[in-house]
Amino acid sequence: MYDIIVVGGGPAGMTAAIYARRASKSVLVLEALSCGGQILNTPDIENYPVEAHISGFDFSQKVYEQAKSLGAEFKFEKAVELKDEGDGKVVVTNKGEHRAKAVILATGSANRKLGVEDEDKLVGRGVSYCATCDGNFYRKKTVAVVGGGNTALEDALYLADLCQKVYLIHRRDSFRGDDTNAERLKARENVEIVYNANVTKLIAEKKLKAIEVTDKNTGDVRTIELNGLFVAVGRVPENNNFANLIDLDSSGYAASGEDCHTRTPGVFVAGDNRAKTLRQLVTATADGAMAATEAVKFVNER
């Protein structure tokens, strides 16, 4: 039995592992895909203390190496269930079961989809959720980004350096993302911003070739010919597998205060899957530190 199992290998989870190991607790980190989480898709982190510019990949690699060097164990398995056995917790994965005295859920969130017909069928054939992963395939071509938060703005800026033309489609008349990035986009000659509009249809043969955009105010429909569509309309928290032991709000985020406790003693939450007002790299790592500190306290008291 481990002292602490961390479910999720993003910035929150890996920071939790660092803090738990520094408290001399045995730690297992379970990650379904690759360590780093959503931040892997960020080409340039500009707002994290100490490093003025660092890629999401490099940042994640450094945190991973730090956690490993302190003795945290990593296994690449997907957690599908959490059981409470009183004096211990059982994390069920796609490969087996692991036991611990305390569990930190740092599962992050998944891409939210547009919900238009044939969206799933066209993933990899013109539809993408990761500009830094797939942007190079559209060099000197025409693409669109859908969304109005920081991810959408960053994706559009990144693609503007690669593509001939970038449309940024947003359902509102102002952005939720940083003003600095919004102003940078407005200054780019190859970027066209389409406000108050929704993507309502994907037009394709073997690959995506155009989209239909509907104006929310007038109902007018515009057809935009393009090669790629990058969807950045938010995230969906990955909490459903653990709803038996934690409370969720109306949006599916784990209900928790700043101490990262849940309603089940010994189960904590950290990062983008937790209900809070600001979801940034710095708040994810802060959550990881807090959750680990509370988990260590829980283990010590028992």
Image: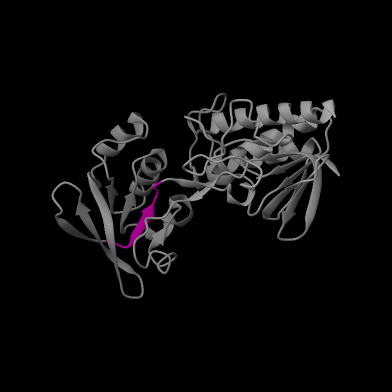
Residue at left offset 59%, top offset 25%: 258
Q: Tell me the magenta residue range.
A: 226-233
Image-based side of 167 in relation to 94, left or right = left
Q: Quadrant of residue 153?
A: top left
Is residue 62 in view? Answer: no
The answer to whether residue 177 is above or below residue 120 is: above
Most foreground residue, 87 or 294: 87
Q: Where is the C terminus found, in terms of image quarters?
A: top right
The answer to whether residue 95 is above or below residue 170 is: below
Residue at left offset 20%, top offset 48%: 216
Is residue 225 one of those drawn in magenta? no
Image-based side of 7 in relation to 100, left or right = left
Colouring scheme, one of rainbow, by chain, secondary structure, one colour? one colour
Residue 111 is situated, as x and y percent measured from the top left of the image, at 47, 51
Residue 69 is situated, as x and y percent measured from the top left of the image, at 78, 37
Most foreground residue, 45 or 243: 243
Q: Where is the N terminus found, in terms of image quarters?
A: top right
Residue 139 is situated, as x and y percent measured from the top left of the image, at 37, 57
Residue at left offset 47%, top offset 42%: 250
The answer to whether residue 116 is above or below residue 47 is: below
Q: How many marks?
A: 0
Is residue 230 one of those drawn in magenta? yes
Is residue 294 in view? Answer: yes
